[in-house]
């Protein structure tokens, strides 16, 4: 698994569905550089039984991300047409109608490959033909990308293990606190808790207050 933290997020231009129903051909995270932090997440597939819970959870918390000036963008290896259909299917019928953040289409699987979340890999068989080994879908991955386009946090889970919205917001808050105050955020820190400077005296004081 590649560690992208501290590196420029892999760039791409791909079809996507935005605003819950508008298909565009050249969606890119580059539009947010210099403007917003981005939570970019991967999920395995459209029209599954459990993936809707994750996408709907992001929508439920979308206002919380937006008030922190963070864009939320999802991605799977499905087509833009599959995304559109899913976005326009009622919840009772297994759809995610009401989700209005962008969903990127990665049919070529190159975006998932570049973020190293593809649950398998391409290789050559004995006849010299390219063959895919594994599951041709993405793991559940989340990448926090700052305004400079640099990955500051990444979490990649196996398909049965879902992402925590509260943890995603906590990490966003920690990055924003560091950017504003220059203080590091210790274990289990959340907005409103005391942070500290990266000095021996500050750490000693913090640990003393924990006793």
Image (tube, grey):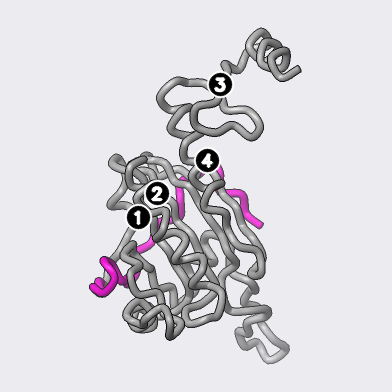
Q: Earlier in the sequence, mark 3 or mark 2?
A: 2
Residues drawn in magenta: 1-24
Disc 1 marks which residue? 29
Q: Position of residue 11 (x, y in %)?
A: 40, 56
Disc 3 marks which residue? 194
Instruction: Say few, some or many: other residues with alpha carbon within 10 Å of mark 1 (under 14 / 14 to 19 / 20 or more).
Output: many
**Magenta stretch, overall SS:** loop
Discs 2, 4 touching: Cβ within 8 Å: no
Distance between the alpha carbons at the discs numbered 3 and 1: 33 Å
Q: Earlier in the sequence, mark 1 or mark 2?
A: 1
Distance between the alpha carbons at the discs numbered 3 and 4: 15 Å
Distance between the alpha carbons at the discs numbered 4 and 1: 20 Å
Disc 4 marks which residue? 171
Q: Circle 2 sits in a helix, a strand or a loop, which is it? A: strand
Discs 1, 2 touching: Cβ within 8 Å: yes
Q: Position of residue 42 (x, y in %)?
A: 50, 64
Name the residue: 62% across, 54% down.
Answer: 2
Instruction: Say few, some or many: other residues with alpha carbon within 10 Å of mark 4 (under 14 / 14 to 19 / 20 or more).
Output: some
Disc 2 marks which residue? 38
Mark 2 vs mark 4: in front: 4
Q: Position of residue 5 (x, y in %)?
A: 56, 44
Distance between the alpha carbons at the discs numbered 1 and 2: 8 Å
Q: Earlier in the sequence, mark 3 or mark 4?
A: 4
């Amino acid at each position: 698994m590649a560690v992208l933290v501290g590196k420029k997020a892999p760039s791409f231009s791909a079809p996507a569905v935005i605003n819950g129903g508008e298909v565009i051909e050249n969606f890119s995270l580059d539009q947010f550089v210099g403007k917003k932090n981005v939570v970019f997440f991967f999920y395995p597939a459209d029209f599954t039984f459990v993936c809707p819970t994750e996408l709907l959870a992001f929508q439920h918390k979308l206002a919380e991300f937006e008030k922190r000036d963070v864009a939320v963008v999802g991605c799977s290896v499905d087509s833009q047409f599959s995304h559109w259909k899913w976005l326009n299917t009622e919840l009772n019928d297994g759809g995610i109608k009401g989700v209005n953040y962008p969903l990127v289409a990665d049919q070529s699987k190159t975006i998932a490959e570049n973020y190293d979340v593809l649950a398998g890999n391409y290789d050559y068989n004995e006849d010299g033909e390219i063959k895919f080994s594994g599951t041709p879908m993405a793991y559940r991955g989340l990448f926090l990308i700052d305004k400079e386009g640099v990955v500051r946090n990444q979490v990649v889970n196996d398909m049965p293990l879902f992402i925590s919205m509260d943890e995603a917001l906590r990490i966003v808050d920690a990055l924003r606190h560091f950017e504003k105050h220059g203080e590091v955020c210790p274990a289990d820190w959340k907005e409103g808790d005391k942070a500290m400077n990266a000095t021996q005296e500050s750490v000693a004081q913090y640990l003393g207050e924990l006793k």
